[in-house]
């Protein structure tokens, strides 16, 4: 992620980061989650398959004194998402480019929205050329921003339209 895109991301979410919980899928170096932790996120889980990447994340967490609030998980993201979910405020998805993994990941989260708190967000980082409209049942795209070669797509849980239209139930 470029510095410009990371600065923009935290400009968008900064007021909600304090005390939040982050799930970082395809964690890479962990730079986004480390930034969130340094801004007051309560805890983070970083999922990465590569042992070398996990060692880098561990070194970065140790260097920044943020190890206590982070858990590293060596796992395939797709298998990890098949587990019973624990909700997070933010799920950050930044897979290797040009493999279609962002849509596959989003479909898995959509199928089990328990990965998000009711007001949680999934944030996807991709190259703009990778973007395609996808049909989801439980998540909706509510914002999209491009910063050079980085596109950030923001998804939230869909609100229950029936409860909005009907309003609160009245007692007889």
Image (cartoon, rainbow, N blue to C red):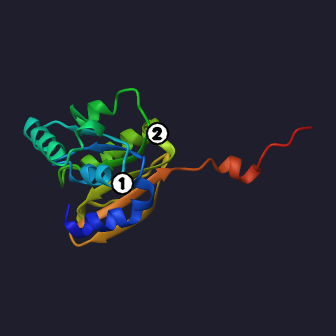
* N-term mark: 1 or 2: 2
User: SS class of the residue under badge 1?
Assistant: strand
Residue that label 2 marks: 113
Residue drawn at point x = 32 percent, y = 54 percent? 124
Q: Position of residue 25 (x, y in %)?
A: 27, 43
- From this view, report whether residue 151 is shown above or below residue 79: below
Q: Which mark is residue 123?
A: 1
Q: Say whether residue 63 is visible.
A: yes
Screen quadrant of the C terminus: top right
Residue drawn at point x = 31 percent, y = 52 percent? 36
- From this view, report whether residue 84 is shown above or below residue 127: above
Q: CA distance from mark 1 to mark 2?
A: 14 Å
Q: Position of residue 6 (x, y in %)?
A: 26, 63
Q: Position of residue 157 (x, y in %)?
A: 50, 48
Whether tag 1 and tag 2 are in contact, CB under 8 A, the answer is no
Q: Say whether residue 70 is visible.
A: no
Identify the residue at the far top of this view. 84
């Amino acid at each position: 992620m470029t510095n410009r895109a990371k600065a923009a991301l935290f400009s968008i979410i900064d007021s909600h980061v304090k005390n939040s919980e982050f799930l970082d899928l395809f964690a890479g170096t962990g730079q986004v989650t480390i930034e969130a932790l340094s801004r007051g996120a309560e805890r983070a889980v970083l999922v990465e398959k590569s042992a070398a990447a996990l060692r880098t994340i561990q070194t970065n967490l140790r260097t920044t004194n943020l190890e206590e609030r982070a858990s590293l998980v060596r796992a395939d993201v797709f298998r990890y998402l098949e587990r019973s979910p624990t909700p997070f405020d933010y799920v950050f998805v930044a897979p290797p480019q040009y493999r279609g993994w962002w849509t596959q990941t989003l479909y898995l989260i959509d199928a089990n929205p328990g990965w998000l708190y009711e007001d949680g967000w999934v944030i996807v980082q991709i190259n703009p050329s990778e973007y395609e409209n996808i049909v989801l049942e439980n998540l909706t795209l509510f914002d999209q921003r491009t910063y050079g070669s980085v596109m950030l797509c923001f998804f939230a849980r869909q609100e229950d339209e029936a409860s909005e239209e009907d309003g609160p139930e009245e007692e007889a």
